[in-house]
Amino acid sequence: MNSMKHARQYWYPVAMIDELQAGQQRDTQLLDTRLTLTGDDQCGLIATANEKALLVTQACDHWWVTLCDTPLPIFDLPEAQEHERRFVPCGVVHVECSPLRAVENFLDIAHFPFVHTDVLGAEPHTEVYRYDVKVDESCDEVIASNIRFFQPQAAKSAEGGIHTEYTYRVPAPMVAVLYKTCPQKPDAWDVIALFVQPLSEDSCDVWPWMALFDNESTLSELIEFQQMIFVQDRSILENQIPRRLPIDPGIEIPTKADSTSVAYRRWLKQRGAYYGALAS
Amino acid sequence: MRAKTGHEDLVVWRSASGVLSAWENRCPHRGMRLSHGFVRGESLACAYHGWHFECSGRCHYIPAHPELELPRTIKPTTFDVVERDGLVWVNTTEKAIPFSLPAGATPLRSITCNTTLDALTNHIFGTTKPCSNSGCHSTTVESQQPCVLSTLLTDSSHRVYLAMQASEDHTTVVHALLSMEANETQRITVSRWLESLRREAESP
Amino acid sequence: MTFTLYNYVLSGNCYKIRLLAALLDVQYGTVAVNFHPGGEHRQEPLLRLNPAGTLPIMVTSDQTLTETQAMLVWLAQHYDDSNSWWPIHDLDTLPTVIQWLGFANRLTSSIGALRQHTLLNKPADASTTRAAGIAALRELECRLAEQSIRGEQWLAGKSPTVADIACFPYTALSPDAGIENDDYPAIRSWLHSVRSLDGFITMPGIHELHQMRDPAGASAGTLRDHHG
Ligand SMILES: N[C@H](CCC(=O)N[C@@H](CS)C(=O)NCC(=O)O)C(=O)O
Ligand code: FES
Ligand SMILES: [Fe+2]
């Protein structure tokens, strides 16, 4: 199957739920295809490509569309039904990079001390301890768990440094979800997800989303924290060369700390998810 | 800092003790441009995950694995680099051999023009004599593509040397040098002249 | 409380105020404004504070300021005992400072507008703002190259002024807008000078100078960002 055909089977985020009022229109792009989004009277969304209406669905405070008539089911995120959480769609950020590079960066912790200095990491606490990575056969997802990292300010709600624990899931090539220690509720996990809208193979719109336990911060403060983190990553993402993700080993050198990235690349390759990848 | 030659994206950096290096501008780990990195003592560290590279190019420290013994093979492609007369010369295929500049010239400034090298040199030596109305007369030229050196004489008889470097994206970097004796006012005049040279060369 | 800043973490104009406040070691309160995606700065109740619908907004005990250049001057007048950031007694330098304060508005309307477009998908005329941004950077480069010929490091006078702070954010953030600043050596070395100032803080898109940090962590904290 070619890379485009493969990519078209999935659902992609294109807007926040309440973004477009009835009659309001916005143009965007998905997998090299021009889309027009229009809000309708029933608070719904109409998405068209080349005058053809596309399948549309709602998930995690966003509108998702697919270019395929018989798409794969959208990923499952049970935490989105836990109503004691605060759901925070953070708004779109445009990045000139491969959608796969954006996901891979989200799965990486070794950059925290250098890119998110004094927030998600700080020298000398740079060591990445051994963690577990597997492809879960039941749901065919990459899962990395038992990740521990020292963080000066793990979340908006954190006061001082803590050892944070992380678990990552990649339920679709352009969707990544992380579970991390919740500073205010040590027995629970905060959920942060990155939903990537691939505009082309080397540019994307990224829609970060969070489901948190935090009763103190204002919504603006929570959004601000996440935007600060993601825009720190953006200047890295726009300066990685080549722009597309090298999916075959050889061009780039991984270490043990990159086990998630290695598993992600291998998983993409096995399923033929080459859209945004540089195949040799 | 980042530099471009004909087709190569380079990082050029100087260690604390003064050693100069020019490498391919790509970290071998995850491809980050090394020109965004930071110099710590005798190492260049990558901005993304902080891998440290010594002047030879060899990676000697990976912060995610502080104890790890590293093979000598992890290094970006390195190039020959020479510093002379205040200019840095790089050759991405063989040994770097600088043009010989007459003694007594000091660097003034480097300025990037949105024109090809040919268009720029044609402009400087063209029949329209664009430079004369700004007080400069061009005299000689040495050329060795993709790099050209030309000598100009200002009204106050100071020599200006232009080392011009073409880049694949149709821009040209001009490194201007000026006789050591030129005073502050004369140096500023030549800097302004470079600005008008660029304006004229870029105008359609 | 000295003042309250209605703040947005990704705004270069808000960062100007945070930066000078940090350099002068002034404590203040912030209110996080949901600029994106919320657009709160263009709605009530913020329009009551600033009908222009822009950020930042600075509220002091006796006035509300909505122009960043004025806020910088207010900060310097109240908290810089040396009178060097706003050199009110140096009549040779002051007009030049004001000249570059004015120039800073051109950076906002070109690079700042283009950056909102490339970063947050806000509407802007990409080719016009890009051309204006490059023209502005070239002018700044010319000025700084001449200053360096004079043996000076800053935009006006012998020490940093509010003009340097006003021009710093959108110059440093130009790569966010797709305008690389590798081609401007005098700008790069001036950016480095600003980033090396004692008390300097970062914002997303402007990384810390890690070379100044002790890798063992002893000085960690001295270059901290103040968030929220
Ligand atoms: N009031 C001017 C302009 C400030 C400005 O342009 N702020 C931007 C954010 S950095 C803004 O609020 N733009 C309004 C908008 O784009 O909706 C100043 O203080 O220099
Ligand atoms: S990309 Fe350079 S250290 Fe990771
Ligand atoms: Fe990150």
Image (tube, grey):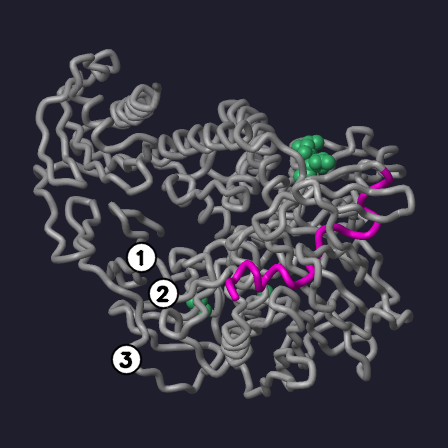
Q: Residues within 10 Å of mark 1 (few under 14, many from 20)?
A: many
Alpha-carbon distance for marks 2 and 1?
Answer: 8 Å
Which residue bears the numbered disc 2?
B44
- The answer to whether mark 3 is within 8 Å of ligand 2 is no
Q: Is residue B177 above or below residue A243?
A: above
Quick check: marks 2 and 1 in contact, CB under 8 Å? Answer: yes
Can the viewer see residue A29 in this picture?
Answer: yes
- Which residue is drawn at the image coordinates 51% and 58% (left, top)? A236
Can the viewer see residue C77 in this picture?
Answer: no
Q: Quadrant of residue B134?
A: top left
Asked whether A6 or A260 is in front, the reply is A6
Q: At label 2, which amino acid type do we have?
A: Leu
Quick check: marks 2 and 3 in contact, CB under 8 Å? Answer: no
Residue B96 x %, y %: 13, 54
- Which residue is drawn at the image coordinates 58% and 29% (left, top)? C101
Badge 2 or badge 1: first in the primary sequence:
1
Residue C109 x %, y %: 60, 30
Quick check: marks 3 and 1 in contact, CB under 8 Å? Answer: no
Residue range highlighted in magenta: A1-22
Which residue bears the numbered disc 3?
B72
Q: At label 1, which amino acid type do we have?
A: Trp
Which residue bears the numbered disc 1?
B13
